[in-house]
Amino acid sequence: MSWVFERVQDAVTDRPSLRVDIDPDTTISAMLRGVGFARWNGAFNRLRGRRRAVIVMYHSFSPGGKAAIAPDTLRWHLDLIRDAYHVVPLERLVSALANGESTDGLAALTVDDAYEDFFTVAYPMLRELRLPATLFVPTGLIGGQSDWYDERRTPLKIASAALLRELDPHVVKLGSHTVHHHALAGLNPATVEKELSRSKRDLESIVNGPVTLFAYPFGGHDSYTTETVRALKNVGFLAGVTTRWETYSSRRELMTLPRISFRETDTASTVQAKLGGDFDWLCGRQLASRFLRGALNRSL
């Protein structure tokens, strides 16, 4: 949450004064960087058998879309990531984690929801730069539009099956985002199995090959359970990504891999700091928030 000093009107000139935005997350991360947070946090994670797992998450590239990133911003993001990391397919990063191989210097790109703006904005850039990415698709909404937002957000069109078939498989791999984009934790086991197995079959019929990667809709701690993780494995998925924030993971977490994301307003130094692990303290805040919500619900 940002602290915002709202615009005020000058009483004499009737002109707005300057607006100042202060992002506390960036401020806290800068303070932690000053005491070497990323260094000692990395050492602690390595002692726990965890490795670097930089997985970047995007959603939309249209004004008003979820976590929208403008085309020009996406371009310099990709240039920065390409210069600092070896961008690999998500399945390669998963394989390295599973086999205990080094993941230093690796990063994977992911895009959720398969909006049409992926094809008009992101895909041409990825092809030009030859950067691999994984696109997670809610298969029951292919050719339709997002219907999981409230009335304050404009629905975005989701790509058609024809567009999905045009993707270069050497650049973009498809992954499941369920059928209807429902949070799995709120569904009964039979419905969870249908959401997973049908979405997998739908995508495999499009790509004429196996689909082994999955992204949880909404993706926070409350959107999955040990039962949904077990169902993912039973259906045949090899890995699942969440919206948990962190740049470290392990072979024990392949079904609940964390990711990081950027804001349109992030500066280059902030993007670099997020990639470098300076914002990994956010995973602790997410856990604390979940605990407090649970305690509050139990008290009501």
Image: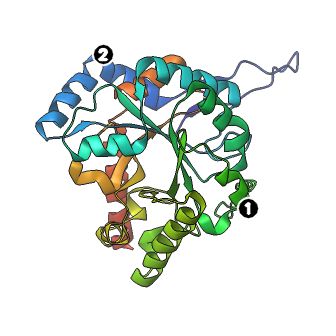
As drawn, the label of residue 285 is: none
Q: Position of residue 47 (x, y in %)?
A: 11, 36
Residues packed near mark 2 inside 10 Å, few (<14), some (14 to 19) or many (20 plus): few
Q: Give, as a three-letter code, the residue at label 1.
A: Gly
Image side of residue 113 versus residue 300, left or right: right
- Residue reaching furthest to the right: 13
User: According to the image, label 2 marks what residue?
Assistant: 34
The picture quadrant where one finds residue 239 is: bottom left
Q: Position of residue 182 (x, y in %)?
A: 54, 68
Q: Where is residue 83 in the image (x, y as percent from the top left)?
A: 46, 17
Figure coloring: rainbow
Q: Which badge, 1 or 2, comes first in the chain's sequence?
A: 2
Q: What's the residue at 22%, 49% (across, down)?
A: 251
User: According to the image, label 1 marks what residue?
Assistant: 143
Of residue 166 and residue 147, the one placed in the foreground of this image is: 166
Image side of residue 48 versus residue 253, left or right: left
Q: Give, as a three-letter code, the residue at label 2.
A: Gly
Give the CA distance from mark 1 to mark 2. 48 Å
Of residue 200 and residue 269, the one placed in the foreground of this image is: 200
Secondary structure of the residue carrying numbered label 2: helix
Q: What's the residue at 55%, 20% (across, down)?
A: 79
Report the mark closest to the observer, 1 or 2.
1
Q: What's the residue at 31%, 58% (across, down)?
A: 291
Against 97, residue 80 (above or below) is above
- Note whether residue 266 is visible: no
